[in-house]
């Protein structure tokens, strides 16, 4: 598991823990190991005990790893996203350990490979007892490459649960609001994870917004803190008074507030009436659009959102998110939402992790001996 996979799987691990299961993690990165061993906010407990290094997927290495795992008497092995290791799967299957693939994704190149392999009688995904796809599209593709399509299911992306878990409490949000001196009635929009090249677009849009809504505030969080100097210079050239979180500035009298600290973007998203998620007006691929969405605020993104294609489609279907292909569209989108005094009624936010664990639990109960 990588860092991202560990983080997205935490809600799944918590659901298993609530049902009395012990969690053993295996990760191949240092950052993934750190994430898996740190306490989570729910009660301060660790999600995994122990955390093991991921072995090389060679027959001798996989065999030794599974042999060492037997001391924990595993009742299931859960793999995530694209973690499909043939030797590991084969040894698990030999020991009759149920195999589950969660948040499963299939890249176009992988789809072509699995299609060809399945026609030759080699279906790697057949190792799994059940597959939970990350999107409906992934589910359709995977169903074409297994001998029993009914074992491929789609209940939603568990990144929803991960975003819900990282959502700030109302008390913490209110404390942040007081710290920066923000009037609850002030129209605020947030631009998060802004990349170089996007700051000019966003600040030009905000200048136009201020002509229509003079007291509008932009909270801008650069993806990398080195960008804050460019933001400050651009604000100065546009005549937009700006302040910085690191300087404990108050927002009164400011037009732009720069979040130049780490670990607070989730809280600042909660202060906005709407949000733009960066890395999408430049060809980076976007960032996690679920972070603002879990607060029930409208979210938008630019044309380069290929890393979050399935999730943005789901947000659009739920009337939570929108594509703003250029600066003019972004201006119109933000203006319209800041002029609304009340938040738009959103569709309920899903919690796929609970449904996935319920289903796995039913499988494990049905195969218990006796």
Image (spheres, rainbow, N blue to C red):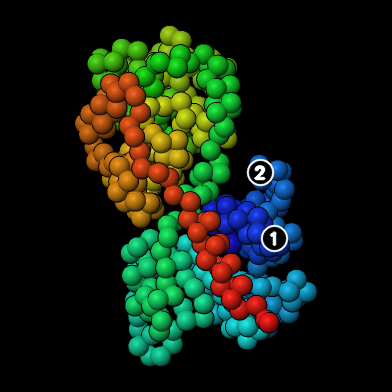
* Between 246 and 74, the one nearer to me in the picture: 74
> Which mark sits nearer the N-terminus, 1 or 2?
1
Q: Look at the image and tell me in which quarter the N terminus lies.
A: bottom right
In the picture of the structure, the residue carrying the numbered disc 2 is: 42
Is there CB contact under 8 Å for labels 1 and 2? Answer: no
CA separation, marks 1 and 2?
15 Å
Instruction: Give me the residue at 42% from left, 57% from top.
Output: 156
Q: In this picture, is 161 found above or below 71?
A: above
Instruction: Give me the residue at 55% from left, 16% from top.
Output: 178
Q: In this rendering, would 175 be left or right of 219? A: right
Residue 219 lies, in percent from the top left, at 43, 25
Q: Most extreme residue toward the right, as rendered?
A: 71
- Numbered disc 1: secondary structure: loop
- Numbered disc 2: secondary structure: loop
Q: In this rendering, would 103 be left or right of 204? A: right
Q: In this picture, is 175 found above or below 114?
A: above
Give the numbered dot on residue 20: 1
Q: In this rendering, would 242 be left or right of 112? A: right
Give the numbered dot on residue 275: none
Instruction: Give me the residue at 26% from left, 31% from top.
Output: 333
User: Where is residue 9, by image quadrant?
Assistant: bottom right
User: Does residue 364 show up?
Assistant: yes
Decide: few, some or many residues near mark 2? Use Cα within 10 Å; few <14, some 14-19, many ≥20: few
Residue 310 lies, in percent from the top left, at 35, 55
Q: In this picture, is 369 found above or below 184?
A: below
């Amino acid at each position: 598991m990588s860092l991202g996979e560990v983080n997205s799987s935490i809600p799944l691990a918590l659901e298993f823990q609530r049902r009395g299961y012990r969690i053993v993690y295996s990760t191949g990165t240092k950052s993934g190991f750190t994430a898996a061993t740190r306490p989570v906010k729910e009660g301060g407990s660790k999600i995994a005990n122990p955390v093991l290094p991921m072995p090389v997927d060679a027959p001798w290495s996989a065999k030794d790893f599974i042999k060492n795992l037997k001391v924990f008497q595993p009742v299931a092995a859960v793999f995530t996203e694209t973690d499909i290791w043939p030797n590991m799967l084969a040894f698990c299957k030999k020991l009759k350990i149920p195999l589950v693939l969660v948040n499963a994704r299939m890249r176009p190149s992988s789809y072509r490979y699995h299609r060809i392999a399945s026609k030759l009688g080699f279906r790697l995904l057949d190792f799994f007892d059940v597959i939970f796809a990350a999107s409906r599209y992934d589910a359709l593709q995977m169903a074409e490459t297994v001998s029993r399509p009914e074992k491929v299911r789609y209940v939603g992306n568990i990144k929803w649960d991960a975003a819900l878990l990282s959502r700030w409490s109302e008390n913490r949000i209110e404390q942040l609001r007081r710290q920066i001196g923000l009037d609850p009635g002030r129209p605020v929009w947030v631009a998060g994870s802004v990349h170089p090249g996007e700051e000019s677009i966003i600040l030009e849009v905000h200048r136009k917004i201020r002509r229509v809504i003079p007291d509008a505030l932009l909270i801008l969080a650069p993806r990398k803190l080195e960008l804050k100097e460019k933001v400050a210079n651009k604000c100065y050239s546009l005549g937009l008074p700006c302040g910085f979180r690191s300087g404990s500035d108050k927002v009164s009298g400011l037009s732009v507030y720069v979040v130049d600290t780490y670990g607070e973007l989730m809280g600042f998203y909660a202060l906005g009436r709407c949000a733009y998620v960066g890395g999408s007006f430049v060809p980076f691929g976007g960032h996690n659009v679920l972070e603002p969405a879990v607060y029930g605020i409208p979210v938008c993104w630019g044309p380069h959102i290929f890393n979050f294609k399935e999730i943005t489609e789901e947000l659009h279907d739920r009337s939570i998110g929108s594509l703003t292909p250029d600066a003019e569209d972004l201006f119109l989108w933000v203006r319209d939402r800041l002029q609304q005094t009340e938040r738009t009624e959103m569709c309920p936010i899903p919690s796929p992790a609970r449904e996935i664990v319920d289903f796995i639990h039913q499988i494990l109960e049905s195969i218990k001996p006796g």
